[in-house]
């Protein structure tokens, strides 16, 4: 009988932060199982990892936004005799625009992928993570630290990821499982244009390349940090938020969102089908 192989599962691995995290984990010797769509782009990420001299990752072209997809993933892992040692949740998406004006079903799909799927994947393989003394790395955003008028659902999902991850960090630490929430600011990728976001929309001082974010996220994860905010400017920004009155903060954020193209994508649904990569 074929031996069960431990792997690090990375969702949203076809592009952006997810792909950068896949390369970073591979660089440090982790065997990978990559989950995302579209399949050709996901295969390209696997090809890049092979070119690094690492074993080819297992590839799962699955749309995690479809109800029941996590169960399908679990069954395929069993069929291939793979067992999770780490879970990296990078799939997610968001829309710019007032909640009352955006498509109702799409906003519910955002909650489904950003929250329900992430929660499912965090909790589904706890026993396996304990056996391997592994961990969970969730990709959140600095958007999780403050409300987002003009992107209300998106910010709320990122706040959930932050608070859920902080609690899991303390709950699972006695079991030997590390839990880290990676909260980047704007990510400097070519997918900003595809997302409908102007190149000058975010202050350049807050922008960081995906590889930079992945490198700091991986290091924080290995060190067992609870929350990682890559970039000193982003850390200062997050720290200052506590001193700004909530009403003023919401007015400032809302004004900025109204200046953006309505309905533009902020996070690509790297685990889905028709969207770009993660940016915030």
Image: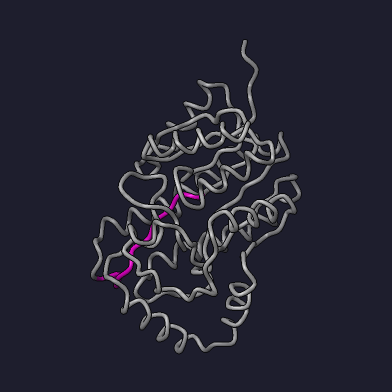
Residue in view at x 49 percent, y 85 percent: 246
In the foreground, 203 or 217 = 203
Above or below 118: residue 85: above
What's the colour scheme?
one colour
Magenta span: 90-100
Q: Position of residue 145 (x, y in %)?
A: 54, 72
By secondary structure, the bulk of the magenta-drawn segment is best described as loop
Q: Point out the image quarter for the N terminus.
A: top right
Total marks shown come to 0
**Is there any visible trace of residue 68 in the rendered image?**
no
| Extreme residue toward the front, this view | 51
Location of residue 232 by image quarter: bottom right
Location of residue 266 by image quarter: bottom left
Residue in view at x 42 percent, y 31 percent: 72
Q: Position of residue 138 (x, y in %)?
A: 56, 53
Left or right, residue 85 beside residue 250: right
Q: Position of residue 156 (x, y in %)?
A: 44, 66
In the foreground, 36 or 201 = 201
Above or below 243: residue 43: above
Q: Position of residue 29 (x, y in %)?
A: 68, 36
Residue in view at x 45 percent, y 36 percent: 44
Left or right, residue 155 beside residue 211: left
| Residue 97 is covered by the magenta coloring | yes
Location of residue 125 by image quarter: top right
**Is there any visible trace of residue 255 in the rendered image?**
yes
Above or below 99: residue 3: above
| Residue 48 is covered by the magenta coloring | no
Residue in view at x 49 percent, y 66 percent: 186
| Extreme residue toward the top, this view | 1
């Amino acid at each position: 009988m074929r031996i069960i192989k431990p792997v690090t599962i990375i969702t949203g691995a076809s592009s952006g932060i997810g792909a950068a995290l896949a390369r970073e984990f591979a660089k440090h010797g982790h065997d990978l199982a990559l989950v995302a769509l579209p399949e050709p782009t996901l295969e390209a990420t696997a090809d890049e990892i092979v070119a690094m001299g690492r074993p080819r990752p297992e590839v799962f072209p699955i749309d995690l936004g479809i109800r029941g997809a996590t169960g399908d993933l679990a069954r395929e892992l069993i069929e291939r005799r793979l067992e999770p040692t780490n879970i990296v949740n990078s799939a997610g998406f968001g829309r710019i625009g007032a909640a009352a004006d955006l498509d109702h079903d799409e906003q519910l799909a955002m909650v489904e992928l950003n929250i329900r799927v992430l929660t499912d994947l965090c909790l589904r393989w706890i026993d396996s993570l304990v056996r391997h003394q592994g961990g969970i790395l969730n990709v959140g955003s600095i958007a999780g630290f403050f409300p987002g008028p003009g992107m209300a659902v998106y910010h709320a999902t990122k706040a959930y990821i932050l608070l859920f991850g902080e609690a899991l960090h303390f709950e699972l630490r006695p079991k030997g499982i590390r839990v880290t929430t990676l909260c980047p600011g704007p990510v400097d990728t070519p997918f900003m244009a595809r997302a409908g976001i102007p190149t000058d929309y975010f202050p350049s001082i807050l922008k960081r390349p995906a590889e930079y974010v992945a490198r700091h996220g991986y290091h924080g994860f290995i060190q067992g940090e609870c929350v990682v905010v890559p970039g000193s400017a982003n850390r200062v920004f997050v720290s200052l938020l506590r001193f700004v009155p909530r009403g003023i903060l919401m007015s400032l954020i809302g004004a900025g969102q109204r200046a953006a193209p309505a309905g533009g994508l902020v996070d690509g649904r790297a685990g889905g089908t028709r969207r770009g990569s993660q940016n915030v």
